Amino acid sequence: MHLCIIFLGAFELITDESRAGSCLWITNRRGLEYWPTPAEEAKYTVRSSSSSRSDMISFQAPLGFQLPHNFKKLVVHTLSFHFRDSTHIISAPLKLPLESDQVLLKVIYAGVNAGDVNFSAGRYFQGTKEEISSLLPFDAGFEAVGIIAAIGDSVRNLKVGTPAALMSFGCYAEFVKVPSKHILPIPRPDPEIVALLTSGLTASVALEKVGQMKSGQVVLVTAAAGGTGQFAVQLAKLAGNKVVATCGGKEKARLLKELGVDRVIDYKAEDVKTALKEFPKGVDIVYESVGGNMFDLCLDALAIRGRLIVIGLISQYKGKNGWTPLNYPRLEKLLSKSQNVSGFVLVQYGHLWKEHLLRLFHLYSSGKLKVVIDQKRFSGLHSVADAVEYLHSGKSTGKVVVCIDPSFEHQMAKL
């Protein structure tokens, strides 16, 4: 892929048509110099593995841009589960040049996650409340896709202009600066790719490594029409399993049927406990993200030697104090049926991200995996709090995404 973004400093307009696609670099030390030179071309050429090359889609950045002196980002300034009250937008200097191994990503789309409210409350940090408060302010946002805008001197495997994904704190920002090892080259900077990151990877890794999913099993997915649930039901079905899914509302139920779910349980239309009695031997795997009463119903429906994966407790994230630990007196039931209840946090499986992301890319690009993006549009950093609240309202279907740079989206629409 040969992509070019004209960026920062004393680059002048090139009128020589034979130099199309190049830049003219003007410095006191070296005078006029066209960039990239042949040596630089070799240095910054993207090296794709043979296993992923077939999945790559040709992409050309629509317009060049200059790097600004300052950029905007969303930071947590006080610890609270109320995301809107705990965050605000600030302007920060874009410090250049980069350190030798750093990459600067221009963010186009950022993903919204249920855990955003836990992050703003400091729940993902170790220490006392006073120790965590001493870290304030800290940058918010877990995942993004965009365009590589600049690279450090020692970066060899990435190129300016390459579409890339990032999973790191601080993605609710116009630009993010990270070590190059955190950058994942992608086919295009599309919202569907954002959905494959935290949401897709959580489903893929959790079901395989924690759920030990095989074929011929019964798999139950709660909140199945959400950002990660949509992938869990499809991956379970692709593996040759019978899939049961819970959701709230006719539209969500319709979507799940389209995704191939065998038994959709709309808790707004029927009783979940009664519906689960249709499986007298129980379910082999539960992919659970709701918590509270739903967790209890899932545990009651778990088969002998069944595995329940807890990936979230979204029903308990709301309120002033968020979720609180509960005394759970039912451990004897787990013992009597040789059952297993396991928690899952994606960050602790970082060594598997690349492998599973390539697998998800392949399934998506081949049409075997559908990606559902919620139709409600959120544009600009100022809309992030609205997007987080919308996700927690229970009204969303699929992945909630914020377009951080609406101008890029408009440029793409013209192509």
Image (cartoon, rainbow, N blue to C red):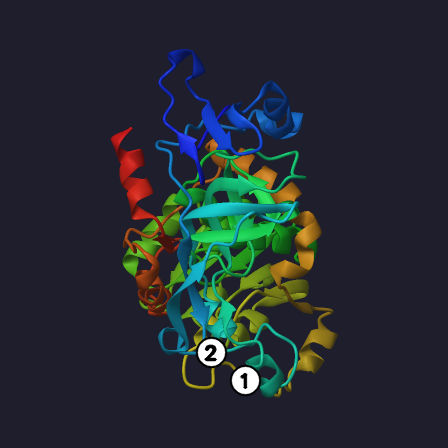
Whole-percent x, y for residue 373 in the image? 36, 49
Secondary structure under the numbered disc 2 in the rendered image: helix
Q: Residue at left 45%, top 35%?
A: 188
Whole-percent x, y for residue 7 in the image? 44, 37
Whole-percent x, y for residue 80 in the image? 45, 81
Measured Cα–Cα span from mark 2 to mark 1: 8 Å
Q: Residues within 10 Å of mark 2 (few under 14, many from 20)?
A: some
Q: Earlier in the sequence, mark 2 or mark 1?
A: 2
- The image's mark for residue 38 is none
**The quadrant where residue 223 appears:** bottom left
Question: Label 2 amino acid?
Answer: Gln
Question: Label 1 amino acid?
Answer: Thr
User: Who is closer to the viewer here, 64 or 204?
Assistant: 64
Q: Residues within 10 Å of mark 1 (few under 14, many from 20)?
A: few
The C terminus: image quadrant: top left
**The quadrant where residue 238 appears:** top right
Q: Are marks 2 and 1 in contact (CB under 8 Å)?
A: yes
- The image's mark for residue 324 is 1
User: Who is closer to the viewer here, 209 or 301?
Assistant: 209
Whole-percent x, y for residue 366 in the image? 49, 30
Give the residue at the far front of this rendering.
Answer: 28
User: Who is closer to the viewer here, 278 or 186?
Assistant: 186
Q: Is residue 320 above or below residue 257?
A: below
- The image's mark for residue 316 is 2
Residue 140 placement, left or right of 208: left
User: Who is closer to the viewer here, 36 or 233?
Assistant: 36
Residue 187 placement, left or right of 359: left
